[in-house]
Image (cartoon, rainbow, N blue to C red):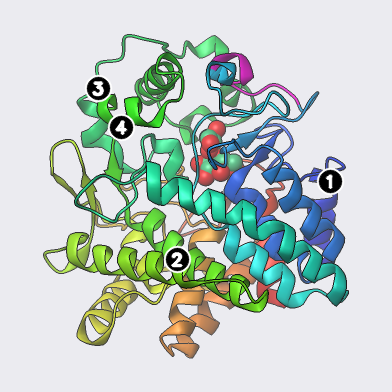
Amino acid sequence: MAEHARQILEGNWLGHATRPSSLLYPHQWSWDSAFTAIGYAHQDQDRAETELRSLFSGQWKNGLLPHIVFVDGGGPYFPGPEVWATEHSPNAPRRPLTSGIVQPPVHATAVWQVYRLARDRPRARRFLHDMLPKLDAWHAYLHRERTRIGSALVEIWHPWESGMDNSPLWDPVLARIQPRDGTAPEHLRTDLRVANPAERPTAAEYDRYLHLVALFRAHAYDDERIRAATPFAVRDVLFNSALVQADHDLTAIARELGKPSTKYEDWARATTQAVEDELWQDGSYADVDVVTGEVLDASTWSRFSPLFAGIPAGDRAEHVLDQLTDAMVEVEGLGPAVPSLSRKDPSFDPALYWRGPVWMNVNWFIYHGLRRYGRHDAAASLRTTMIELARKAGFSEHYHPSTGHGHGGAEFSWSAALVLDLLG
Ligand code: 9WN
């Protein structure tokens, strides 16, 4: 199993970074690289460090860590650098070329894991030392530019920033957008040529994705202007939970290096409190649309992501753990798993990307959450299902929640890397 996973990563290795999947995603993606480094950490310190260093070579002067770092000659992907046109921003690097939006901040978590598991300790310390200012700038960007007065929660401004592109969470927000600028005609969409179109976001969704990119470009990626103008601004449970955990990990990194850590502890405390006060709605965690104040209450897996960061306590934690048990599905002959969307949700579709399939990273977050709350048996069952899914269906992008069949991109890096992490 581990050998097969290593072969997948080897096949996607570009010499300095790992692409998520050869045809569908031929460049370097932000949270994918963090997950991939978490897997490499067990086997290959050099690869793990290189993966994260190369991702951060795309970091902007204002600390923004872009969701894609384009690889010269990497292969066709839409929207490519010419659409992002990040030269409009004084903050974007001239090289490498990048996108102009972010993804969930799991990077400090990855850096801390790479450091903890490294064999060559002096080298690992140099790595930690080099990464601290980069992570500091990244988290400072989020806490500074992605918050508004009155809330410590950070905002996402695009469905791609959530990492869960076509989640039904965004349906009501996207419905308010009338795409005018920058639509996405089918012939430009490289994804439709290499993946099953029935498993990809729709034309209506892509038009709105591109409309938002055109808006960011027109505002020269100036955060203040975008904050005032964007019709898509969401306080997302997963993004904020990942940030709380990453702030805890940044605290550990700073302490390990004998550097001040109070700022990171304060960030973690303030965001935790804000998740508890503002995102707990009627007995469940839910995203909030900043523009309308509306609660986005689709029954996605991300309602459970605060467990990963140890956010809920007492009765609330018990309640979330009970909801989680209810949301699990049984993958035929393999065991329990958490689907990206509850079967009971009207938008549930077992093969449609973030609207039902089982994803490895989702189950990895939940596995760690369960362990954190002492639910070791449930965590062990989830671990077994993930390993058996990979054995049965390979390292797919996502899996059918009943049959366990693989869907989406094949030979998908984070599925391989996170199984390596589970194998230990
Ligand atoms: C847009 C690379 C990425 C993941 C995201 C996943 C998908 C991209 C796309 O692929 O998004 O960023 O083109 O569909 O939704 O989580 O990081 O694997």
Q: Earlier in the sequence, mark 2 or mark 1?
A: 1
Give whichever of 223, 214 is nearer the camera.
Answer: 223
Q: Residue at x 28, y 37 (%)?
A: 233
Give whichever of 206, 118 is nearer the camera.
Answer: 118
Q: Is residue 46 above or below residue 228?
A: below
Q: Check disc 2 and report the residue beneath it.
A: 263
Q: Which disc is residue 11 wearing?
A: 1
Task: Give the spatial CA distance, label 3 vs label 2.
Answer: 37 Å
- Going by the numbered disc 4, the residue's amino acid type is Arg
Q: Check disc 4 and report the residue beneath it.
A: 227
Q: In which quarter of the view is residue 388 placed?
A: bottom right
Question: Is 23 part of what is drawn in magenta?
Answer: no
Find numbered disc 3 in the image and state the secondary structure of the residue it sits on: loop
Specify start and end residues of the magenta stretch as a single range: 75-83
Q: Position of residue 302 (x, y in %)?
A: 36, 59
Q: Quadrant of the N terminus?
A: bottom right
Regarding residue 1, the answer to whether it shows in the image is no
Give the left or right position of residue 38, taking residue 224 as reference.
right
Q: Residue at x 24, y 51 (%)?
A: 298
Q: Quadrant of the C terminus?
A: bottom right
The response on whether ligand 1 sits within 8 Å of label 3 is no
Regarding residue 371, the answer to whether it shows in the image is yes
Q: Earlier in the sequence, mark 4 or mark 3?
A: 3
Find numbered disc 2 in the image and state the secondary structure of the residue it sits on: helix
